Image (cartoon, helix red, strand yellow):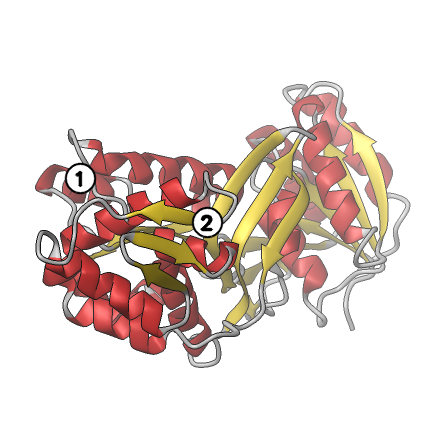
Amino acid sequence: MPIETHLILVSAQPIPNLTPVLDPQLRPKKVIMLVSPDMQQRSEYLEAIINGQCGVEVERHPINDPWDLEAITLQIIDIVDRYPANSIALNATGGTKLMALAAFDVFKESKQAIFYVHPEQDRLIWLNPKQPAIELADKLKLKNYLMAYGAEQVNAENMGVSFDLQDLCNAIIKDISRYEKALGALNYLALEASKNPKLMVTIEDGPLAKPDLWALLELFEQQGLGSINGQNLVFKDEDSRFIANGGWLELYTYKQCLNLKNSQAIQDIARNISITRQSKTKNEIDIGLIKANRLHLIECKTKRYKDNNSADPLYKLDSLRDLMGGLQGKAMLVSFNQLDKASRNRAKELKIAVCCHTELQNLQIHLTKWLQA
């Protein structure tokens, strides 16, 4: 039978505060938050999920000075004294070191339960009394994960790919060396077409001048995404223009992730994710998924890199991972074009997985290794 009340120490890494609450065998009826002044907003994010979405009662206790050991200890004693034996447990994962030490001492002296959430192994370790560790249930959803890190609004597409682009994508990736430059030209044409209400753009070079580009355009036309009238390319609709402007790689990668959902125990997955923070700041993610209660981000690029800018998406990914995924977030760059050696080294330093150019022919293998790492 689960312990009815959990005391949590709110910190900048909210997921270990959240996963035990979501686990059916551990789920409490009440959560008490110990909140330092700099964690007020973080506690609001957590309460919105724990109470607003899970229906668990939340009680917040502010800590005036997170460095005043005596005052913190007295405050925790006051809380614990209200509960009989075995009716309250301490989640010792978060908070400042002083908060954790004070809470640990009080709970151990009172013979109340204490546990710690291993951040990488997604396990709950019992510190008091000693008993076998628990593998936490994978119940965390993508929206709740992002909300815990401050997202006020999350818009995403999490349905399957409704049209079959497999033949198109396979044809491009099979002849990736041939279409490498042509993809850059198609990206430009699709971008220019967005400026025309009819989604039309003029192709300046003919089939003899750029045979690979015209062969690529033919592939898109065969899929019904657009039509060619002389030198004019007209896209069927905005979705078709998006696909030509690099969206095909995002949809292809998303489909590969969907294919791995069951075998890799992916809890939740979505693409084209737009996140609003603090009512104005917007961030976008091509593909986001949750596995083992950890956020995995994927950025898909068909853009050709110039002037050593191939590291730019790596910096973006690194920033988004830290902002939305915390210390345990993972990231991958999927790129049609090759990265230079310096950018490959930078990706390694940033711990960002990379699948580029001819590696796309084995994308599902790369995704599997990344998800299992």
Q: Is mark 1 on a helix, strand or loop?
A: helix
Q: Which of 207 and 279 is in front in this view?
A: 207
Residue at point 66% right, 59% down?
20
- 13 shown above or below 335: above
- In what quadrant of the picture does the C terminus appear? bottom left
Q: Is mark 2 on a helix, strand or loop?
A: loop
Residue at point 19% right, 51% down?
337
Q: Which of 72 and 111 is in front in this view?
A: 72
Residue at point 34% right, 54% down?
233
Which mark, by number, is residue 166? none
Residue wearing tag 1: 343
- Outermost residue to the bottom: 263
Determine whether, in the image, residue 170 is placed left or right of residue 92: left
- Outermost residue to the front: 230
Q: Which of 198 and 244 is in front in this view?
A: 198
Percent x, y of residue 58: 84, 46
Residue 74 sits in quarter? top right
Residue 89 sits in quarter? bottom right
Label whose residue precedes the other's in the sequence (2 or 1): 2
- In what quadrant of the picture does the N terminus appear? bottom right
Residue at point 26% right, 67% down?
218
Residue contact at pointers 2 and 1, CB within 8 angstroms: no
Which mark, by number, is residue 199? 2
Percent x, y of residue 223: 37, 73
Query: Nearer the observer, disc 2 or disc 1?
Result: 2
